[in-house]
């Protein structure tokens, strides 16, 4: 058997195809890292300068015309905001404050100039706030805006609690509780900003604050629901929110900043490069038998003193080894070339994940985590490569053997979504909901209710055995006299 395996490896590495595939894969790895480095600096914001657009629109309007006045005021306010944003730069903390805190103040100042709706007292108050805000923006005092916001939140909270004490209507109390919950969240965000020194500037921790707030708000929808009675889709959404909020809180409390770099790409190795793993695995498995028939070399192979089953199994073992080696190759390329392009600095930082069993955030050695994910993803790659191998044996056609597994891979998510949408419970006996074991890691929930890891492993094993047995039967009985 070892000699047969060795001969198969020699055949594979004599082909130009394998080297072309590896070269394309390497080029993609390098390109991915270059693109990651190029986009990492502006991934937290998107900005388009609308100044010229607003100026052009304003030039076409008459502020003294009642028909144009309302539109003119809106565009004038937007123009002032755009100019201020351009002054400090879209990646500054000032830009965030300008577009979230100052719009109402600027709108009041502009309306006073072009409309009779604003009283002199309201204007003077808004103008004073505007002037003070401009001074704080210029002096880089972002904490002023946090403290100002905290003051307003505390006042609103006091009003809300007082209102709740004087209310007996249950529906009104529920509405007040929702308001209080939202205000308490915003208060927590502001307190974190001051404690952890997180400005309004776009960045990882600022993004974590936003994710935490949005996640906690979304989780409110599940407060009065029985989690055990949620549908599979709802449970997955709930778990995703739970994971996002807990991870964001962990990053904030521990002042952890994670950027798009070599480490982040390695952590998502299998989602980033899964297609290339499958291309190598399926192309090799889909041609390893069929090419013997197409070239007529199968006769020379079968006259050797080995039985047909041993010959076929040696080819299958080689396919599986090539599959594993392709994963190692891609991981190695990412580690080396990703490090050269994006640095090796953060590789000592462990993988950070939320454990649903313990209900807390945990850490694991980076490479141990990647290996664990790889093991859980292996059933996908093994089953699709085995399907290519079986088709290669059954049809003796490389094109068919390569096309069918890829069609299956593309259709797998559609099949799962269709089964979820129409609640087709029998789907749990099909391979696609079972072949990704990473869903079960750290107490995660599977795609469909009723699935467990032992059950999924058993289903995958059954499909694997069926394909191998059929391949062996067909290969053993095939007539090669006319080939």
Image: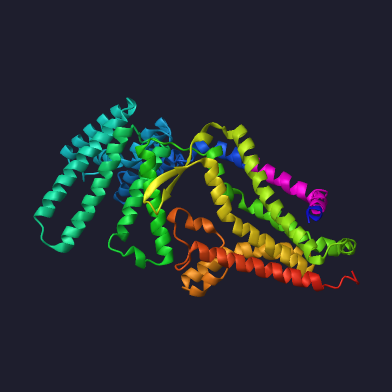
The residue lying at 36 percent from left, 33 percent from top is 94
Q: Is 21 within the magenta?
A: yes
* Quarter of the image that includes the C terminus: bottom right
The residue lying at 26 percent from left, 39 percent from top is 105
Give the image's coloring scheme: rainbow
Quadrant assignment, res 342: top right
Q: Which x, y percent locates residue 340?
A: 62, 32
Q: Is residue 392 above or below residue 67?
A: below
Quadrant assignment, res 317: bottom right
Closer to us: 296 or 66: 296
Q: Is 177 within the magenta?
A: no
The residue lying at 41 percent from left, 36 percent from top is 256
Q: Which x, y percent locates residue 180?
A: 21, 50
Closer to us: 180 or 267: 267
Q: Which residues are magenta?
A: 6-30
The residue lying at 68 percent from left, 43 percent from top is 26
Q: Can the viewer see residue 61 in this picture?
A: no
Magenta residues: mostly which secondary structure?
helix
Q: Residue furthest left?
A: 166
Q: Which x, y percent locates residue 423?
A: 46, 73
């Amino acid at each position: 058997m070892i000699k047969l395996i060795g001969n198969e490896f020699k055949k594979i590495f004599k082909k130009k195809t394998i080297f072309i595939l590896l070269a394309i894969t390497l080029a993609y790895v390098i390109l991915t890292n270059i693109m990651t480095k190029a986009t990492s600096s502006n991934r937290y914001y998107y900005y388009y300068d609308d100044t010229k657009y607003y100026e052009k629109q304003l030039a076409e309007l008459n502020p003294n015309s009642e028909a144009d006045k309302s539109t003119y005021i809106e565009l004038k306010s937007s123009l002032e905001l755009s100019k201020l944003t351009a002054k400090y730069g879209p990646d500054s903390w000032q830009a965030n404050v300008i577009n979230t805190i100052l719009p109402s103040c600027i709108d009041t100042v502009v309306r006073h100039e072009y409309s009779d709706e604003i009283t002199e007292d309201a204007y003077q108050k808004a103008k004073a706030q505007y002037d003070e805000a401009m001074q704080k923006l210029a002096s880089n005092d972002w904490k002023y805006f946090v403290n100002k916001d905290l003051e307003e939140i505390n006042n609103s909270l006091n009003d809300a609690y007082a209102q709740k004490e004087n209310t007996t209507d249950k529906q009104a109390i529920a509405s007040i509780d929702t308001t209080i919950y939202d205000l308490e969240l915003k208060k927590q965000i502001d307190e974190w900003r001051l404690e952890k020194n997180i400005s309004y500037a776009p960045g990882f921790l600022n993004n974590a604050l936003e994710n935490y707030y949005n996640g906690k708000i979304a989780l409110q929808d599940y407060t009065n629901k029985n989690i055990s009675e949620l549908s599979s889709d709802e449970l997955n959404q709930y778990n995703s929110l739970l994971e996002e909020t807990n991870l964001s809180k962990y990053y904030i409390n521990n002042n952890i900043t994670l950027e798009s770099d070599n480490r982040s790409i390695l952590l998502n190795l299998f989602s980033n490069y899964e297609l290339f793993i499958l291309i190598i695995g399926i192309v090799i498995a889909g041609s390893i038998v069929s090419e013997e028939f197409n070239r007529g070399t199968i006769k020379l192979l079968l006259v050797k003193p080995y039985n047909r089953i041993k010959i076929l199994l040696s080819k299958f073992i080689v396919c599986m080894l090539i599959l594993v080696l392709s994963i190692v190759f891609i991981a190695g390329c990412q580690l080396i070339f990703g490090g050269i392009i994006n640095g090796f600095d953060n590789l000592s930082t462990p993988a950070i994940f939320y454990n649903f069993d313990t209900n807390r955030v945990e850490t694991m050695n980076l490479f141990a985590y990647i290996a664990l994910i790889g093991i859980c993803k292996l059933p996908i790659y093994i089953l699709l490569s085995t399907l290519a191998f079986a088709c290669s044996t059954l049809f003796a056609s490389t094109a068919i053997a390569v096309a069918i597994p890829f069609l299956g891979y593309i259709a797998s998510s559609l099949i799962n979504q269709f089964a979820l949408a129409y609640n087709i419970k029998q789907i749990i006996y099909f391979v696609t909901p079972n072949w990704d074991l990473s869903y079960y890691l750290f107490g995660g929930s599977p795609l469909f209710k009723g699935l467990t890891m032992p059950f999924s492993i058993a289903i995958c094993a059954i499909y694997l055995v069926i394909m191998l047995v059929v391949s062996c039967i067909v290969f053993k009985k095939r007539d090669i006299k006319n080939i």
